[in-house]
Amino acid sequence: MSTQPKRQRIQGRLDAITRKWWLYPLLLLLFFIPTYASRSYDPRQSVDLIGQVLSAPLIYAFPVLMPIAKIVTVALFVGVLVYGNKMRRPFNIYVAVLYLALALFQTAAVTDTYGLVVISGNMALVLVVALVWAWEVVAERNDFETRKRPLWRWWVAPLAVLALLAPVDASTMSPDFSPVRLLTNEAGLTFCMMTPVVLAVLTLYCPTVNSTVLRISSFAGILLGAVNMIVWFVLESWGWWMGVLHIPLVVISVYAFVLGHVKVGGGSRDAIPVQPEP
């Protein structure tokens, strides 16, 4: 028996749930899951604790992966734009695996002060994003068929490029436009820099994309982007340049979230399954 009708039913339920307003306050509650630390700490040290995790998470343990992540990202995303649905499965798989890795290893670190620390709220939120992308690997609702699109839709491209390049010296939070640094920095292994790139691609093909993936990914981007705006422009204003580099995350996520409810939500495309190419 074909599994296509079953996938359609599941997709229909997911589409319906992600249209409900109450889902998003529930996702917001994930932020309030307490951070785990193997050594006790004063809650007043929370900002320092989280800062130590984000400055040296487990995912940075293998610096060789940083340029590879950027190269693979560019190759896959250009491949989607050029070859369309022939690159759909590699694109979906890579993004799903990337978000799973970010959930498990960007939100945890072994610190000298606090021992093993896991930012549990961030981990839970990014895991939800990874799960919906894992579903997209199975459902293949993203339709990347080559098509003409209005020129104005490309406004997301410069912001996505800025996020991917992330010209910053992470040790000083100051601008760093050196070519070597642009290739080898951590951006390809971070949620905040990769999400604008992923969402930029989806917005270019909207409305023929997986509505559940678009809505959940963009909402997570809005939440984490807002937190970073507060951190880098208010609490740690000395790092204002890092705040600037998070603007693509906030702007593209808000745009994608709106598209996910206006262009995709409730439209006829939701009711028509996207058939994979033979």
Image: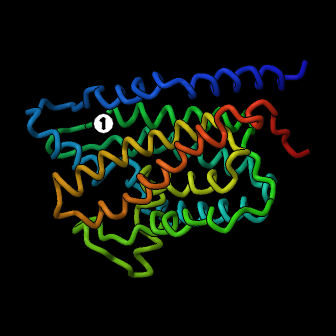
Give the colour scheme shown.
rainbow
Q: Position of residue 143 (x, y in %)?
A: 76, 47
Horizontal side of 114 relative to 121 (left or right) equals left
The structure residue drawn at horizontal position 30% and vertical position 36%, both measured from the top left corner, is 119
Give x and y (percent) for residue 118.
30, 35
Q: Report the amino acid beneath label 1.
A: Ile
Q: Is residue 163 left or right of residue 76?
A: left
Residue 266 found in image quarter: top right
Taking the image as shown, residue 256 lies to the left or right of residue 114, namely right
Nearer to us in this view, 116 or 28: 28
**Front residue of this view, candidates 245 and 76:** 245
Q: Residue at x 39, y 35 (%)?
A: 123
Is 255 drawn above or below residue 276 in the view shown?
below
**Quarter of the figure that contains the C terminus:** top right
Location of residue 78 by image quarter: bottom right
How crowded is the residue under tag 1: few (<14 C-alpha within 10 Å), some, or many (20+)?
A: many
- Image coordinates of residue 151 in percent, x first then y, are 67, 68
Residue at 43% x, 78% y: name it.
180
Left or right? Give the position of 30 relative to 262. Answer: left
Q: In which quarter of the view is residue 142 placed?
A: top right
Instruction: Locate the N terminus and report the quarter of the image it occupies.
Output: top right
The secondary structure type at the circle numbered 1 is loop
What residue did someone put label 1 on? Answer: 119
Q: Give percent across and percent down for residue 217.
A: 52, 41
Q: Which residue is farthest bottom?
A: 178
Up the image or down, 229 lies above or below 270; here it is below
